[in-house]
Image: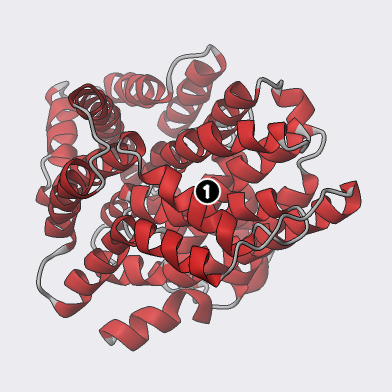
Amino acid sequence: MELIILGATFFGFLILGVPVAFAIGLSAICTILYEGLPVAVIFQQMMSGMNIFSFLAIPFFVFSGELMLHGGVADKIVQLAKNLVGHIRGGLGMSNVVACTLFGGVSGSPVADVSAMGAVMIPMMKKEGFDTDYAVNVTTHASLVGALMPTSHNMIIYALAAGGKVSIGALIAAGILPALVLMACMLVAAYAVAVKRGYPAGKFPGWAEVFRSFAAALPGLLIVGIILAGILSGVFTATESAAVAVTYTILLTFFIYRTMTLQNFLRAAAKAVKTTGVVLLLIGVSTMFQYLMGLYEVADLAGDLMNKVSSEPWMIFLLINVILFLLGTFMDMAATILICTPIFLPIAMKAGMDPVQFGMLMLINCALGLNTPPVGTTQFVGCAIGGISVGAVMRTILPFYAALIAALMFVTYVPAFSLWLPRLLMGYKG
């Protein structure tokens, strides 16, 4: 009965339009009151969930991404991408994919990525004669690569939701190849649609211009190398790397590029504070939710139900993907990670999947949810920039969805995509 109350109140609050964080917290409170447990349990669980040193990486990574967004780094990355692939059929679409991937590496946030790249690339593509739905779909889907990059704070959230079963350093190394696979799939989709619609190719500016734009963008792109090199060499921890990222970004935008203004710095700080507050609230209330799911053995029940459908690992992985995708369509990325990881990670591990590989699976699924209504945060941002309705974009979304699902299947069923680099660089034994 208690589990029914927990599930029914949670989905009931969501249907009523209550924000996810409050729906999680209120459903946990209702269940605790029904159980007759002391109300103090609520606050104890919230505090224990948020009072973790490793969570310091979250505000730092968020702040670093906002500084990159408001510090003019995007323009230099766009120019590099245009010079590299702008001469291919549908060149601006291809440039958009590369630019989103590169900026996702320095921002670590799909929403920041689509905000920065969309503001530059969508108007530019419309001006050059590309359809608005194509421009928006390319931008919103390519921006999802940011969830897999070393600066992604969602990796930190997953590592802690996994209960210490996975190394943050291994996750950071593991995200590189899936991110490249995702970019490659998006390039194929963007090119295929460009050919079908007869979009023109641009002109190659010459290797001298390519090298010149690379030199201009290199200081911004170095943040990924600094984080990877620092963690893999043991110079600093993942938490310390986030602080290093902020320090480097401030020096870069104020003193090297000289594109940061005091007004934009304050705007970036305010947005980072707001985002951090939302994430920590989600972490706190999700800890209560996880406590109750552990109490009622939800993971075991879910595992038993899946085993009744099939005991084959490939089918269990497919079911997990479908469930995560459906949940991600109406839940925020952080909330999905925090709630679903304790349920599905033990099931996936029992079926033979490594927790690092499952982390990549989880992040791609949650990223898919960011581009699917009714939540669809990145899609709403892209549509707002492009001045087009979500319905119009959804009508032509299938090629880009197919690219994302193809990348998800590679990561799900080919462990080497996630585990080769952690094993090579860190000696990971998973």
**Residue 220 sits in quarter:** bottom left
Q: Pick whichever, 71 or 318, lies toward us.
A: 71
> Would residue 420 appear left or right of 289 to someone viewing this image?
right
Provide residue 263's location: percent of width, then percent of height: 22, 21
Total numbered badges shown on the rendered structure: 1
Quadrant where the C terminus lies?
bottom left
Q: Give the residue at x 26% y 23%.
A: 267
Q: Pick whichever, 244 or 356, lies toward us.
A: 244
- Could one spot residue 372 in this view of the protein? no
Q: Characterize the local packing of mark 1: few (<14), some (14-19) or many (20 or more) Cα atoms within 10 angstroms.
A: many
User: What is the secondary structure assignment of the residue under circle 1?
Assistant: helix
Q: Give the residue at x 27% y 37%.
A: 259
Q: Give the residue at x 16% y 38%.
A: 50
Q: Give the residue at x 57% y 64%.
A: 84
Q: Which residue is mark 1?
A: 144
**Residue 23 sits in quarter:** top left
Q: Pick whichever, 28 or 202, lies toward us.
A: 202
